Image (cartoon, helix red, strand yellow):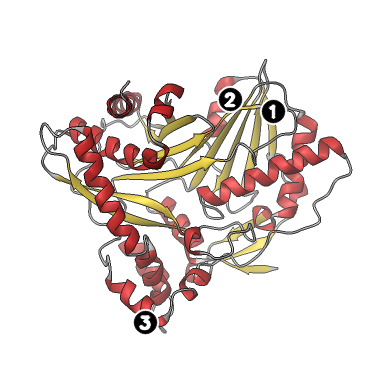
């Protein structure tokens, strides 16, 4: 059976073929203890039955692309087990195959304390949807431990498009939003992160965990804005551009506009808003933070991210216009970006009596010269990450950027 490919499915596919990203979202969960590998594998198979898009394959026909059902019995890579850390890391940095499926895969690293890596195709889900998916996976695992015959009695296969969000805005309101923040889309980048010319590149993710003390010192109401301000300051320092305006697209979860936020479909509902600010020479952190907070507050009053959604909705409604073909030729990829994947809820990511020490998510691994900072939090920990297909020298430079970011947040938290 064929299923319509939504606009953002096609967008993510184009991100790969046009050299922006690997269009995957990456998750790593560290346990305090040993997982039941057999039960965890069964949970993976039950998950793809409960969320059918995960077991479909993508047929690329341009604007007529679609998904179709596949046979999970053909897959031997849905769930793998290793005792080797390097193999585990390679898995974390790897891709799913949208043409053959599955659209999600798992790798369990066994040791004194196990870890689980999960990679999902960004074409089927953004970070917020991935979190919902992982909550469901942990729930299935927990129920299987109590009842080996457990099978979910539901299917998550609802409407995957974003028209429900657009429909909740009145016609006149939609027209107004099309002109509010009309440049709130990806623009040509003025600056880019310095990378080293090299023919030897490979995928990697550099991550940094914020100390628990610093996490507590940052007021919960401004942790996200503090991180954004620190990112601006770190980049301005490292790129030597203090006093010059820097534009950074920041991902926005558009589920904020849905009245019904229950998990009815696994999909992409992420948009962007552009934050433009200059960090002046000798400007302290508090001044930068106030500046970023003011910008974000103004944007929130204008429906964050809605402009992009409405433009796409309008563009794909115009008869006789190949919006997909135009997209492929005119996509402008931001050289520097940021996404706050947000809180991974420890009460919902629960594997029965197996404690979770930390859970991290990272955005798609970018192709040079692009970078994107990912931010997630779990209980009293914040983790930053940047993924890149780059050289070892690039890896060191990204580590330096995270050093700057860490130092800025320490100054904000009084550490």
**Crowdedness near tag 1: few (<14), some (14–19) or many (≥20) residues, C-alpha within 10 Å:** some
The residue lying toward the viewer, choosing from 256 and 374, is 256
Secondary structure of the residue carrying tag 1 is: strand
Can residue 59 be seen here? The reply is: yes
Residue 20, x across and y down, in percent: 37, 48
Image quadrant occupied by the N terminus: bottom right
The residue at 66%/19% (across/down) is 113
Q: Does residue 197 appear left or right of residue 35 in this picture?
A: left
- According to the image, label 2 marks what residue? 87
Kindly report which numbered mark, 1 or 3, lies closer to the viewer in this rendering: 3
How many numbered marks, from 0 up? 3
Secondary structure of the residue carrying tag 3 is: helix
The residue at 45%/31% (across/down) is 383
Secondary structure of the residue carrying tag 2 is: helix
The residue lying toward the viewer, choosing from 317 and 273, is 273
Contact? badges 1 and 2 (CB < 8 Å): no
Q: Earlier in the sequence, mark 1 or mark 3?
A: 1
Kindly report which numbered mark, 2 or 3, lies closer to the viewer in this rendering: 3
Residue 26, x across and y down, in percent: 53, 39
- According to the image, label 1 marks what residue? 81
Q: Quadrant of residue 41?
A: top right
Q: Earlier in the sequence, mark 2 or mark 3?
A: 2
Q: Alpha carbon of mark 1 to alpha carbon of mark 2: how far?
A: 10 Å
Q: Does residue 405 appear left or right of residue 309 in this picture?
A: left
**Crowdedness near tag 2: few (<14), some (14–19) or many (≥20) residues, C-alpha within 10 Å:** some
- According to the image, label 3 marks what residue? 172
């Amino acid at each position: 059976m064929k299923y319509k490919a939504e606009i953002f499915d096609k967008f993510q596919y184009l991100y790969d073929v046009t050299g922006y990203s690997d269009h995957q979202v990456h998750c790593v969960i560290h346990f305090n203890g040993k997982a039941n590998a057999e039960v965890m594998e069964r949970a993976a198979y039950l998950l793809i039955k409960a969320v059918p898009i995960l077991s479909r394959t993508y047929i690329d026909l341009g604007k007529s692309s679609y998904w179709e059902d596949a046979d999970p019995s053909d897959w031997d890579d849905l769930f793998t087990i290793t005792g080797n850390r390097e193999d585990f890391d390679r898995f974390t940095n790897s891709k799913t195959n949208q043409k053959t499926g599955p659209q999600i895969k798992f790798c369990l690293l066994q040791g004194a304390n196990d870890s689980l890596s999960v990679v999902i195709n960004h074409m089927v889900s953004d970070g917020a949807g991935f979190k919902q998916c992982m909550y469901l996976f942990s729930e299935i695992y927990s129920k299987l431990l109590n009842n080996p015959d457990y099978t979910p009695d539901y299917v998550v296969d609802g409407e995957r498009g974003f028209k429900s969000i657009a429909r909740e805005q009145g016609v006149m309101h939609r027209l107004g939003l099309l002109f509010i923040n009309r440049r709130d889309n990806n623009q040509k980048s003025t600056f880019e992160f310095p990378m080293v010319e090299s023919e030897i590149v490979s995928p990697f993710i550099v991550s940094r965990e914020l100390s628990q003390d610093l996490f507590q010192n940052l007021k919960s109401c401004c942790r996200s804005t503090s991180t954004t301000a620190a990112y601006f300051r770190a980049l301005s320092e490292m790129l030597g551009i203090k006093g010059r305006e820097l534009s950074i697209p920041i991902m926005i979860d558009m589920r904020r506009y849905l009245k019904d936020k229950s998990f009815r479909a696994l999909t992409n509902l992420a948009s962007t808003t552009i934050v433009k600010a200059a960090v002046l020479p000798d400007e302290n952190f508090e001044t930068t933070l106030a500046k970023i907070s003011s910008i974000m507050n103004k944007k929130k009053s204008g429906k964050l991210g809605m402009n992009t959604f409405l433009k796409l909705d309008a563009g794909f409604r115009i008869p006789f216009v190949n919006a997909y073909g135009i997209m492929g030729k005119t996509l402008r990829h931001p050289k520097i970006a940021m996404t706050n994947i947000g809180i991974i809820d420890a009460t919902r990511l629960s594997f029965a009596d197996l404690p979770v020490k930390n859970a991290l998510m990272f955005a798609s691994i970018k192709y040079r010269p692009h970078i994107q900072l990912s931010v997630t939090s779990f209980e009293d920990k914040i983790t930053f990450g940047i993924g890149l297909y780059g050289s070892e020298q690039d890896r060191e430079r990204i580590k330096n950027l995270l050093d700057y970011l860490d130092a800025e947040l320490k100054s904000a938290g009084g550490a």
